Image (cartoon, helix red, strand yellow):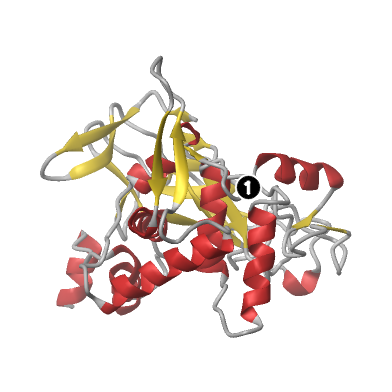
Amino acid sequence: MSWHEGVRVVFEDARGRYVEALRDIESGGLLFASAPSQTPPSTYQPRLFHIAGEVLLSEKCAAAMVYRNADPPCCSFCLRFLEKDPPEFRCDGCKLECYCSTACKDEARRLYHSSDGECAAFEAGIEAEAIGFEFGDVPERFLLRVLSQAGGWRTPGGPLVVGAGIDRVRMLQAHVPAPDTEERGRLAGISRNTLRLMDESVEDGVRVVDPSGDEPATTSRYGEAELTQLLCSVNCNAHTLYANDRSSLAPVGIAVYLQGSAFNHSCIPSAEFCNVGTSLTVRSLRRVRAGEEITVSYVPTTMNLKERRRCLEGQYKFVCACPRCVAENVS
């Protein structure tokens, strides 16, 4: 993870966390993406994006996942476009994860997609779908990915490792519904079903180990309440991923970034998120003055006011009052 030397993260009681420019940040330029040679013409859409601005943040993901029906199809590990259909390299267990090479397949298995852990849980989810159980990419499958990739969970009965980042994900901004509401009950049900897919006790939860410091490792549990908060944090801080060749406007996956979540929203943003594989780069879009907050847009800026508000209120639970929204609301 690398922050630009000209920015800082600020914490204030009234405003919360935000990113501020310490010096003037230069603007970016507009470029058109050309179609990569391996991209089928029928699936290519020219993508207008900013690339010449200053890099404000580069960060590896805490967790990332490719949708099972991603279009264009891309590698579950590196997001490279998959030329062959059906894919040549597929997980031998769950069959959901597809790769561009044996190297990506082996690395995913080593880092998070263990045969007894996440892979087996994915298999259990697919089998449960046959009897009416909902096992979608979001949130069910992605919650398992966060537990395995950010939390280090590898096998039933095995622990989540706090030092791997799982608690840092859970403590991101989360809008947890009030107790005894229908939405809280729905999320709690997803948490309980996740524990079942992991072959863990619904009553006891997942064992958590904190190996940090000189003191002996402490052990606690991630039960329904902790998983529900984690689920809300993931829902509120997830970023869309695009294919590694940026050949399509269609999203192919989802990821969570611990530092990237520090940027607040504006419908007239001064920076933008770009993913290269599953890593995040934040670049400036326009000149930012020293002392000015740096913002990104959580939704496509081409949306009208009604569409933007529907998306922002639905996922992020706030009504935007940026100058653009105020002006459009009056007109």
Task: Using the image as rendered, state which of residue 331 and residue 306 is in the foreground.
Answer: 306
Determine whether the residue tagged by mark 1 lies in a helix, strand or loop.
Answer: loop
- Residue displayed at 74% across by 52% down: 80
- Residue displayed at 19% across by 43% down: 16
Residue 50 horizontal/vertical position (percent): 52, 49
Residue 9 horizontal/vertical position (percent): 29, 33
The image quadrant where one finds the C terminus is: bottom left
How crowded is the residue under tag 1: few (<14 C-alpha within 10 Å), some, or many (20+)? many
Among the 4 quarters of the image, the one containing residue 198? bottom right
Task: Using the image as rendered, state which of residue 134 and residue 240 is in the foreground.
Answer: 134
Among the 4 quarters of the image, the one containing residue 312? bottom left
Q: How many labels does the image show?
A: 1
Q: Name the residue under label 1.
A: 155
Q: Look at the image and tell me whether residue 56 can be seen.
A: no
- Residue displayed at 46% across by 26% down: 211
Among the 4 quarters of the image, the one containing residue 14? top left
Residue 122 horizontal/vertical position (percent): 65, 63
| 256 left or right of 95 in image | left
Task: Using the image as rendered, state which of residue 186 and residue 32 is in the foreground.
Answer: 186
| 119 left or right of 63 in image | right
Task: Using the image as rendered, state which of residue 324 and residue 157 is in the foreground.
Answer: 157
Name the residue type under label 1.
Thr
Residue 262 horizontal/vertical position (percent): 33, 43
Q: Residue furthest top?
A: 214
Whether 218 is drawn above or below 170: the answer is above
- Residue displayed at 68% across by 52% down: 244
Q: Look at the image and tell me whether residue 114 can be seen.
A: yes
Whether 265 is drawn above or below 4: the answer is below
